[in-house]
């Protein structure tokens, strides 16, 4: 399951909810789309979107069969999720974060640098945070001058060391 938004509150009395979108793909919230929440019993519960509008930087969604404020009250604070099969197919050389995190980083000379622990998105390009076996953090910019090969199936990334990258 992949989180695409968070229900932050109810809106009005007719079952709408305020959602903070955390997906780059707004079409995941289109009318007719199915999203999921994990209920208190840890069960996956499908919700069919039958209404969508925006309010400032939030989405106002309505789910089929949830027509009162009481029916959506329990959804407050839950994450909206999709299944892996619902992921949007990416273009060549584009990857989801979950595919990159956990990859082992090697130099073009075959030296092991460490494992990608997380990803920052500060602006022009992503920055991968690599944890070395010496317990140091190294920041690797995801740019073509540095990242030479990505093999998500074997969880390997090959980089070209440039001056000052590891020092």
Image (spheres, rainbow, N blue to C red):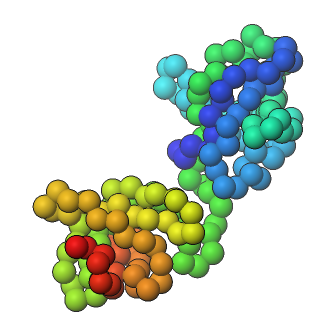
107 to the left or right of 87: left
Residue 149 visible? The answer is: no
User: Which percent across, then down, holds residue 84?
Assistant: 56, 53
Residue drawn 74% across the image and 51% down it: 26
User: Which percent across, then down, holds residue 103?
Assistant: 33, 66
The C terminus: image quadrant: bottom left
Residue drawn 83% across the image and 35% down it: 55
User: Which residue ends up furthest to the left in the rendered image?
Assistant: 134
User: Which residue ends up furthest to the top in the rendered image?
Assistant: 70
167 to the left or right of 75: left
Question: Is 110 drawn above or below residue 69 in the view shown?
Answer: below
Residue 70 visible? The answer is: yes
Residue drawn 63% across the image and 40% down it: 5
User: Which percent across, then down, holds residue 100?
Assistant: 42, 64
The part of the image, by quadrant, that contains residue 127 is: bottom left
The part of the image, by quadrant, that contains residue 114 is: bottom left
């Amino acid at each position: 399951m992949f989180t695409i938004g968070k229900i932050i509150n109810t809106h009005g009395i007719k079952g709408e909810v305020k959602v903070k979108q955390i997906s780059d793909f707004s079409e995941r919230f289109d009318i007719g789309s199915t999203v999921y929440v994990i209920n208190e019993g840890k069960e996956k519960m499908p919700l069919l979107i039958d209404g969508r509008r925006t309010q400032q930087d939030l989405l106002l969604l309505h789910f089929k069969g949830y027509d009162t404020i009481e029916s959506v009250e329990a959804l407050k604070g839950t994450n909206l999720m999709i299944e892996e099969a619902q992921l949007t197919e990416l273009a060549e050389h584009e990857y989801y974060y979950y595919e990159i995190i956990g990859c082992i980083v090697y130099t073009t000379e075959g030296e092991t640098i460490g494992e990608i622990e997380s990803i920052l998105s500060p602006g022009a390009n992503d920055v991968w945070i690599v944890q070395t076996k010496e317990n140091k953090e190294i920041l690797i910019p995801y740019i073509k001058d540095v990242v030479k090969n990505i093999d998500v199936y074997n969880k390997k990334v090959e980089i070209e060391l440039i001056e000052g990258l590891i020092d």
